[in-house]
Image: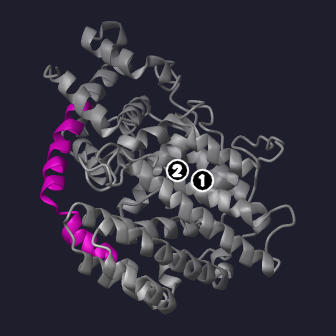
Amino acid sequence: MQWHQLLNPSRLGGKPPKAEPGRSPFNSDHDKIIFSGAFRRLARKTQVHPMAQNDHVHNRLTHSLEVGCVGRSLGILAGLKLAEINQLPDAVCAADLGDIVQATCLAHDIGNPPFGHTGEEAIKSWFMNAGNHLLQNMREEEAHDLIHFEGNAQGFRVLTSVENHINKGGMRLTYATLAASIKYPWTSLPAAEGQRPRVHKFGVFSSELETFHEVAEATGLLSKSGDNWYCRHPLAHLMEAADDFCYGILDLEDGLEMEILGWDEFFEIIEPVIPAPSMSEMEADIRRLKSTRRKLPLIRGKVIETYIEAASDAFLKHQQQYLDGDDTPLIELCPPHIRDSIKAAKSIARQQIYNHARKVELEIGAYNVIATLLDVMCHSVIEWVHDRDNMSFRSQRVLDLIGEHSFDTRIGSGEDHGKPAGSSQDYLALRRVVDFLSGMTDNYAIYLAKQFNGMAI
């Protein structure tokens, strides 16, 4: 792969970038994401702890903003180091890489449904069980998109189809940003069959397959030995590393805030990452301060700075293998003390923070909320597809709620082809239901499930 093509500033659909003084096309991508409704709703979506009562605990919006900050710094630093060895095209500066990585970081969770990963599992469970009979008229790939629902693939759909220009390019971002945003550049069926690097993880639904190929070809992503499979854009590794770094320290901070973890447990993981001179400067202040909230800012910056420096060095050292299509996660190429601290942080988060009693209680309830919403909406839209002249008043009101204008225009037109070729009308209809559900906040999903059950105040 070549950097000049990987950093393609043209927009989806082959549109040339707009010339704006003081604002690059990649700045524009950043702004489009920030000002989107899908991004704004992350403020009331679960990061780790559903419906957290403590305002200091992260939600999806604060997490995404923090990952964006880390990603911007990591992208700029990597860009500066590439520029020093004359690896960047003449028309590109280090800040452009920072803008691209920041935009992808801001969007990395934009497709996540309410209740975070539990919401993903609840959607999968419903289509695998109660709603499985609705998948009978679909191609196998389409059915797998629903029974293996993936927030990453939904995020690509939000960026390219759902938000702003619905079914007409979405946010119309640059090819570079779209390509770098695809963490798992393959489709659902081969992933479910264990033929891809991550089982059940994928980044593209059948409905966006043509767009996926357009983005991959425009940026020169290398095709892998399998259908609809490309190597990652090199900057996707920086986005993933920024997310891992924030998980590594900020999930533990939430554990401290909620008194699930103690300071000593937290500090044991973080201390090996802090450079010795910095540790010497901070030790007295850390001992003096009684409040955990006061201690955290003293060390957070030093830890993240160390992570960024290590990752940018690793990226520079291994950039050629990334350009050749290697998909080794950047964290695995960092020095052992960096890699081990991230793994230790994730391990303690899984063992203690993710199993907190209140989190578990709300996650169990989330299954009922998701099931209620899908049961009502999916059956209504299937009735609309197959018998709209005789559909019930209730189903018509569901269509009014979702917005009949927002469905793919091929539904009911007699067409059963297009983008992608052979898409079933049932699939296109249910795809829109999942768009509507995935865009909900935790609060609205709970409210609407109560409304559907006649239990709302």
Residue 24 left/right relative to 75: right
Report the front residue among 10 and 280.
280
| In the image, residue 71 lies in the stretch drawn in magenta | no
Residue 203 left/right relative to 100: left
* Image-quadrant location for residue 438: top left
Residue 450 in picture, x, y percent from top left: 18, 27
Q: Amino acid at mark 2?
A: Ala
Above or below — where is 383 with respect to 91? above
How far apart are the alpha carbons under marks 2 and 1? Answer: 6 Å
Residue at the front extreme of this rendering:
288
Residue 102 left/right relative to 49: right
- Would you call the spot at circle 2 few (<14 residues within 10 Å), some (14-19), or many (20 or more)? many
User: Which residue is at a point 21% across and 22% down the rendered structure image?
Assistant: 451
Above or below — where is 198 with respect to 171? below
User: Which residue is at a point 49% across and 88% down the rendered structure image?
Assistant: 275
- Would you call the spot at circle 1 few (<14 residues within 10 Å), some (14-19), or many (20 or more)? many
Residue 57 in picture, x, y percent from top left: 31, 55
Q: Which residue is mark 2?
A: 107
* Image-quadrant location for residue 425: top left
* Image-quadrant location for residue 391: top left
Q: Dot 1 lies on which element?
A: helix
Q: How many marks?
A: 2
Above or below — where is 381 with respect to 223? above
Q: Is residue 45 visible?
A: yes
> Which numbered marker is on residue 103?
1
Above or below — where is 444 with respect to 149? above
Residue 83 left/right relative to 348: right
> Which numbered marker is on residue 341?
none
User: Marks 2 and 1: CB-CB under 8 Å?
Assistant: yes
Magenta-colored span? 345-373
Q: Amino acid at mark 1?
A: Ala
